[in-house]
Amino acid sequence: MKKGLLVISMMISLAIGMVGCATKGDVERLQAQEMQNRAKADQAAMDAQAAKAAADAAALKANEAAARAENAAKMAEERERIADEKAQKADAAFQKSMKK
């Protein structure tokens, strides 16, 4: 009886051991999946780098445009100041000519 029980338990253990082992196909499938995941991760990293480069270029262009706009605003203010001075001089000349 002990021998029969021992044989049955060994057969069950062997069957469980055989079922629990991964086959070569399972390992190859897992390796292929891992390589696909790495390729996707590499592609995502390259896409992120390209997006960062594009964002940096856009930020640089925006900064340059802002600097040009600020310069244009300063020039417009200077022209306005000069126009105001000329208008004051013309008004003063007109007032002076009216007094004569």
Image: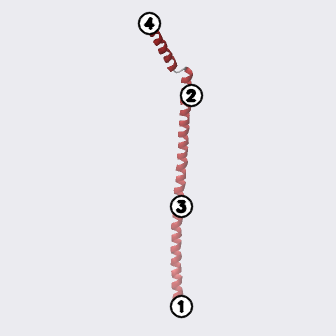
Q: Are marks 2 and 1 in contact (CB under 8 Å)?
A: no
Vertical arrangement, residue 87 with respect to residue 22, above or below: below
Q: Are marks 4 and 3 in contact (CB under 8 Å)?
A: no
Q: Which residue is mark 4?
A: 3
The three-letter amino acid code for the residue at tag 1 is Met
Report the side of 58 relative to 4 (left or right): right
Neighbours of disc 4 within 10 Å: few (<14), some (14-19), many (20+): few
Q: Tag 3's secondary structure?
A: helix
Task: Tell which circle, 4 or 3, labels the residue nearer the N-terminal end.
Answer: 4
Between the C-alphas of marks 2 and 4, the distance is 45 Å
Q: Which residue is mark 3?
A: 68
Task: Tell which circle, 1 or 3, labels the residue nearer the N-terminal end.
Answer: 3
Between the C-alphas of marks 4 and 3, the distance is 95 Å
Neighbours of disc 3 within 10 Å: few (<14), some (14-19), many (20+): few
- Circle 4 or circle 3, nearest the eye: 4
- Circle 2 or circle 4, nearest the eye: 4
Vertical arrangement, residue 63 with respect to residue 5, above or below: below
Quarter of the picture containing the N terminus is top left
* Residue at image location 53% in from the left, 69% down from the top: 76
- Circle 1 or circle 3, nearest the eye: 3
Q: Which mark is residue 56?
A: none
Task: Tell which circle, 2 or 4, labels the residue nearer the N-terminal end.
Answer: 4
Q: Are marks 2 and 4 in contact (CB under 8 Å)?
A: no
Q: Tag 1's secondary structure?
A: helix
The three-letter amino acid code for the residue at tag 4 is Lys
Between the C-alphas of marks 1 and 3, the distance is 44 Å
Q: Which residue is mark 1?
A: 98
